[in-house]
Image: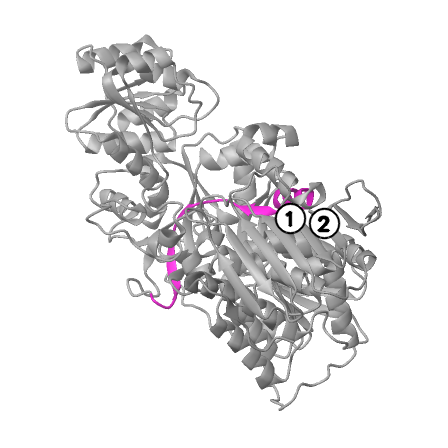
C-alpha cells in the first residue's frame, strides 16, 4: 500500500510503498476514503523538517535536553546513532480521516465490515491507504454525513475540546484569534452554542469566511474595527472568553487577549503560539488561562487509546471518542458546516505535489482533503490472504546438532524500535556472512524504515510469513517485554535459532513455556541479549584479575534513574516490573564474573521509593550485591562494579575505565583515560552469528540463561516474603 511520509533529517516528502498493516485485536482495519491535511499542525511539521540542524534544535529545546541526558547516560557514539537513526527515518503525516471498515479485529462488536467510520490519531489515522485503528479512536459515521465531511472529525474534536475548556454560556461574547481551520470550527461551535463571536486574522478572506459562517464581526488584529466590535457587543466590558487558535512566534495574540478580555475572563490556548504573558495585564484582570489538550480526555493515555479502556461517563462525560462522535452528530444536524472550509481536494497520488504547493504558498487553503476513492464506491471486501504456514517440525526426544552453513546467515528481525535500530542493527549491517532477510513490525512504516536504512530484503507485518520462511536461519526478537516468551517459543518451534532481547520471560510460567518448546522441538539454539559479559573492557579486566581460589564479594551499583512519564516500562500490569525487565543484565554479569549460577536470592526495598537491594548467593560462598536505584542523580555514572577476592579488587567504571588492584599497585586496563562506552553488543552479535553459521555451541549455555531468568524473577518473591529464596537447579 502507499503512505505519505517525511524524512525529518532531509525534509524529503514521499508517497512510499509500505507493507499493509495487519488487523490486531481491539481495533479495525480501515481503507481510507478521505483524509484531511491539517494546514496548521502538519505544515508546521513539514516546515520544521526543512530547517537546518541548528534550526531544528532551536525549535525543539525539549528534545535537545533529552539528547544531553542520553549523552551523560549512554555516551556520545550510542546517542549519536540513536538520534541520527530517529532523524533519518520516515515519519508519518496525518491524523484525521474517514474510511470503510475492511476487517474487524477480535473483541470488536460495534462495527462490521463495510461500515463507514471516522478515525483519529497521529499513529492510526494517517495519510495511508490502510490503517489499523483501535476502538477508542474510531466512531461510526451517522447517516447523511458525507465521508469527505466525516474526515474533519479529529480537527473538529480539537476545536470542540477547546470550546469545552472555555465553558461558554448562552449569551456570552468570545474572541477567536486565528481563523485557520481550527479557528473556523471554533467559531461555528460557539455560534451553535449561542455565543456571539468576534474573529481576528490578518487574512481578509478568512475573516470574510468566518462572518459567512456566523461570526458577528472579524478583522485584522491591528484594526480598530475589532476593538469597536468588542466594545459594541459587550457594552465596553470586554469579551468573556478568548480562544487562541493562532500559531507562530509573535506574542501579539496573548497581548490582544489581555486587552480585549473582561475582568476575570477566560483565555484558552488551542493552537501553538508564543505565550509570553504580560504579567501586569493578566494579573490586574485576574485572567484565567487554560490549555486545551488535543482531542479531549484519553489523549496520550495508552490504556485508553491502545487498550480500549474507557472512562466512566459519570466521571468523564466527554472523552476523546465521545468528542469525535459529538462533532459528527453536529454535522449531521446541520449545526456545523464544513463544506465551505474545503479549499481543495487532491487525489492521493498527488500528495507530495499538494504539500509542495501548500508549503510554497502556491495553494492558499483552509482545509485540503486527499481523495482515495469515489464517495459512492462500494465497500471493499477484505481480501483473502494466503499466509505461509509454519512447517511441521520433527519432535525428537533429544536435542539435534545444527548443521554448518556454507552461505550467509539469514536473519529476520521481529521489532525494529530504538534499541534494535541503534544498538543491534548497525553492528549487523554490512557484516560479512550476514544477510538481513526480513523485518517484521506491527506498523507498516517502521518496517519500511528498517528496510530502507538497513537493507532488509523484505518488510512485512506478517510474523507467520517470516517464521515459515525456510530461508530464514535465525530470528531476533526485539519487541516489548510482554511478547518475548511467546515469540521465542514460536520461533523455536519453527526451527529457528533465536536471539531474544532481555528479558527472556516475565513470569515463571512464561519461562516454563520456552523450556517446554526446547524439549518439544529439540531446538535449544537460543541467546538472550545479556551483552555486558561480552564488553571488551570487562573481559580484559577479568583476564587481568586472573583466577581466584576463595569466595568473592561483588558489589554492583546500578544508577538506573527515573523514567519519563508515559514510558511503557512503567506498565507493570502488562510489561512486568522494571527490574524484571532489565535486571537480568546485572544478574548475568555477576554470575559470569563468579563463574556460577546463583543458589539464593534476597531482596529488600527502602520504604517510600523504588530502590532495590538484592543479594545473590553462590555455591562457593561468594555473594553479589546489586543496588538497583532510581533515586540517584543523572550526573552520576550508571553502572559501577567492584569484585573483591584473594586480596585483589577489580573495578569497573561505567564501561569506560577498568582497573585491578593486587595489593601492591593499581593496573589500568589499557589506559587510565576513559574509553568510549562499549557494553558488548557488537561482540555478542558476532558470537551469536558465528554459532549459527558453524553449528557450534551458543555463546551462553541455555542452563545459564534459565538460571539468570529464574533469579531475576525470584526478586519479586523475595520482596514479598522478606526472606531469602532458595533456587533449584543451580549448576
- Relative side of 614 to 429, left or right: left
The mark found on residue 324 in the picture is none
Residue position for label 1: 639
CA separation, marks 1 and 2? Answer: 8 Å
- 45 or 500: nearer the viewer: 500
Residue at the extreme bottom of the image, as rendered: 397
- The relative height of residue 282 versus residue 472 in the rendered view (above or below) is above
Classify residue 264 by image quadrant: top left
Residue 273 falls inside the magenta stretch: no
Q: Quadrant of residue 205?
A: top left
Place of residue 191 in the rendered image (x, y in percent of width and height, measured from the top left) = 22, 30
Question: In this picture, is 266 found above or below 542?
Answer: above
Residue at the image point whose x is 78% and y is 60% from the top? 431
| Residue 367: image location, x then y, percent | 40, 36
On screen, 647 above or below 261?
below
Q: Is residue 181 visible?
A: yes
**Image coords of residue 131 (percent x, y):** 45, 56
SS of the residue under disc 2: strand
Q: Earlier in the sequence, mark 1 or mark 2?
A: 1
Point out residue 711 in the picture as x, y percentages from the top left corner: 56, 67
Residue 90 part of the magenta segment: yes
Figure quadrant of residue 592: bottom right
Determine the residue positioned at 48% across, 21% down.
249
Magenta-tinted stretch: 79-107
SS of the residue under disc 1: strand
Pick the residue in front: 454 or 61: 61
Q: Residue at x 52, y 57 (%)?
A: 579
Q: Residues within 10 Å of mark 2 (few under 14, many from 20)?
A: many
Which of the numbered marks, if any, corresponds to residue 652? 2
For the residue pair 575 and 428, the one nearer the viewer reads as: 575
Cβ–Cβ under 8 Å for marks 1 and 2: yes
Amino acid at each position: 500500500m502507499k503512505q505519505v511520509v517525511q524524512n525529518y533529517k532531509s525534509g524529503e516528502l514521499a508517497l512510499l510503498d509500505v507493507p499493509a498493516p495487519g488487523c490486531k485485536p481491539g481495533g479495525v482495519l480501515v481503507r481510507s476514503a478521505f483524509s484531511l491535511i491539517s494546514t496548521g499542525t502538519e505544515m508546521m511539521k513539514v516546515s520544521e523538517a526543512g530547517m537546518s540542524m541548528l534550526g531544528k534544535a532551536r525549535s525543539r529545546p525539549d528534545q535537545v535536553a533529552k539528547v544531553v541526558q542520553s549523552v551523560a547516560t549512554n555516551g556520545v557514539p550510542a546517542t549519536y546513532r540513536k538520534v541520527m537513526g530517529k532523524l533519518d527515518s520516515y515519519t508519518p503525516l496525518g491524523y484525521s480521516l474517514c474510511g470503510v471498515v475492511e476487517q474487524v479485529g477480535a473483541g470488536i462488536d460495534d462495527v462490521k465490515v463495510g461500515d463507514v467510520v471516522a478515525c483519529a490519531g497521529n499513529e492510526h489515522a494517517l495519510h495511508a491507504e490502510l490503517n489499523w485503528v483501535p476502538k477508542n479512536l474510531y466512531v461510526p459515521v451517522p447517516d447523511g454525513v458525507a465521508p469527505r465531511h466525516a474526515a474533519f472529525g479529529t480537527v473538529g474534536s480539537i476545536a470542540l475540546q477547546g470550546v469545552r475548556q472555555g465553558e461558554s454560556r448562552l449569551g456570552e461574547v468570545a474572541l477567536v484569534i486565528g481563523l485557520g481551520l481550527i479557528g473556523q470550527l471554533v467559531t461555528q461551535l460557539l455560534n451553535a452554542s449561542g455565543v456571539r463571536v468576534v474573529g481576528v486574522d490578518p487574512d481578509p478572506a478568512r475573516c470574510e469566511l468566518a462572518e459567512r459562517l456566523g461570526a458577528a464581526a472579524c478583522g485584522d488584529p491591528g484594526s480598530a474595527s475589532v476593538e469597536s466590535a468588542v466594545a459594541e457587543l459587550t457594552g465596553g466590558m470586554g469579551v468573556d472568553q478568548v480562544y487562541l487558535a493562532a500559531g507562530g512566534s509573535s506574542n501579539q495574540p496573548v497581548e490582544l487577549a489581555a486587552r480585549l478580555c473582561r475582568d476575570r475572563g477566560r483565555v484558552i490556548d488551542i493552537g501553538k503560539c508564543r505565550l509570553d504573558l504580560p504579567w501586569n495585564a493578566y494579573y490586574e484582570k485576574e485572567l484565567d488561562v487554560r490549555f486545551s489538550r488535543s482531542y479531549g480526555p484519553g489523549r496520550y493515555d495508552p490504556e485508553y487509546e491502545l487498550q480500549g479502556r474507557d472512562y466512566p461517563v459519570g466521571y468523564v462525560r466527554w472523552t476523546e471518542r465521545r468528542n469525535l462522535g459529538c462533532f459528527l452528530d453536529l454535522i449531521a444536524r446541520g449545526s456545523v458546516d464544513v463544506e465551505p472550509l474545503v479549499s481543495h481536494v487532491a487525489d492521493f497520488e498527488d500528495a507530495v505535489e499538494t504539500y509542495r504547493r501548500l508549503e510554497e504558498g502556491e495553494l492558499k487553503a483552509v482545509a485540503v482533503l486527499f481523495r482515495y476513492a469515489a464517495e459512492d464506491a462500494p465497500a471493499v471486501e477484505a481480501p483473502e490472504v494466503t499466509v505461509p504456514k509454519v512447517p511441521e517440525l520433527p519432535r525428537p526426544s533429544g536435542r539435534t546438532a545444527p548443521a554448518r552453513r556454507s552461505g550467509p546467515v539469514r536473519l529476520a528481525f521481529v521489532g525494529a524500535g530504538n534499541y534494535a535500530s541503534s544498538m543491534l542493527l548497525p553492528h549487523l549491517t554490512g557484516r560479512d556472512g550476514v544477510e538481513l532477510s526480513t523485518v517484521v513490525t506491527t506498523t507498516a512504516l517502521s518496517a519500511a524504515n528498517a528496510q530502507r536504512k538497513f537493507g532488509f530484503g523484505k518488510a512485512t507485518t506478517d510474523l507467520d510469513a517470516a517464521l515459515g520462511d525456510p530461508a530464514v536461519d535465525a530470528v531476533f526478537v526485539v519487541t516489548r517485554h510482554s511478547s518475548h516468551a511467546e515469540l521465542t517459543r514460536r520461533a523455536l518451534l519453527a526451527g529457528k535459532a533465536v536471539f531474544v532481547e532481555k528479558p527472556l520471560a516475565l513470569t515463571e510460567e512464561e519461562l516454563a513455556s520456552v523450556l517446554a518448546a526446547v524439549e518439544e522441538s529439540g531446538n535449544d539454539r537460543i541467546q538472550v541479549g545479556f551483552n555486558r559479559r561480552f564488553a571488551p573492557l570487562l573481559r580484559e579486566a577479568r583476564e587481568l584479575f586472573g583466577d581466584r581460589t576463595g569466595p568473592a564479594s561483588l558489589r554492583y551499583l546500578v544508577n538506573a534513574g527515573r523514567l519519563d512519564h508515559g514510558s511503557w516500562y512503567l506498565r507493570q500490569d502488562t510489561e512486568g516490573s522494571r527490574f524484571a525487565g532489565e535486571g537480568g543484565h546485572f544478574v548475568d554479569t555477576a554470575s559470569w564474573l563468579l563463574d556460577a549460577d546463583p543458589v539464593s536470592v534476597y531482596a529488600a526495598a527502602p520504604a517510600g521509593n523504588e530502590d532495590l537491594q538484592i543479594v545473590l548467593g553462590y555455591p562457593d560462598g561468594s555473594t553479589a550485591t546489586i543496588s538497583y536505584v532510581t533515586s540517584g542523580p543523572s550526573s552520576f555514572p550508571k553502572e559501577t562494579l567492584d569484585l573483591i577476592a584473594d586480596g585483589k579488587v577489580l573495578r569497573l567504571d561505567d564501561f569506560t575505565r577498568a582497573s585491578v588492584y593486587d595489593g601492591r599497585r593499581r593496573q589500568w586496563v589499557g589506559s587510565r583515560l576513559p574509553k568510549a562506552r562499549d557494553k558488548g553488543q557488537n561482540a555478542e552479535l558476532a558470537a551469536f552469528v558465528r554459532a549459527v553459521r558453524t553449528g557450534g555451541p551458543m555463546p551462553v549455555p541455555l542452563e545459564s540463561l534459565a538460571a539468570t531468568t529464574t533469579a531475576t524473577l525470584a526478586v519479586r518473591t523475595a520482596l514479598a516474603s522478606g526472606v531469602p529464596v532458595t533456587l533449584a537447579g543451580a549448576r
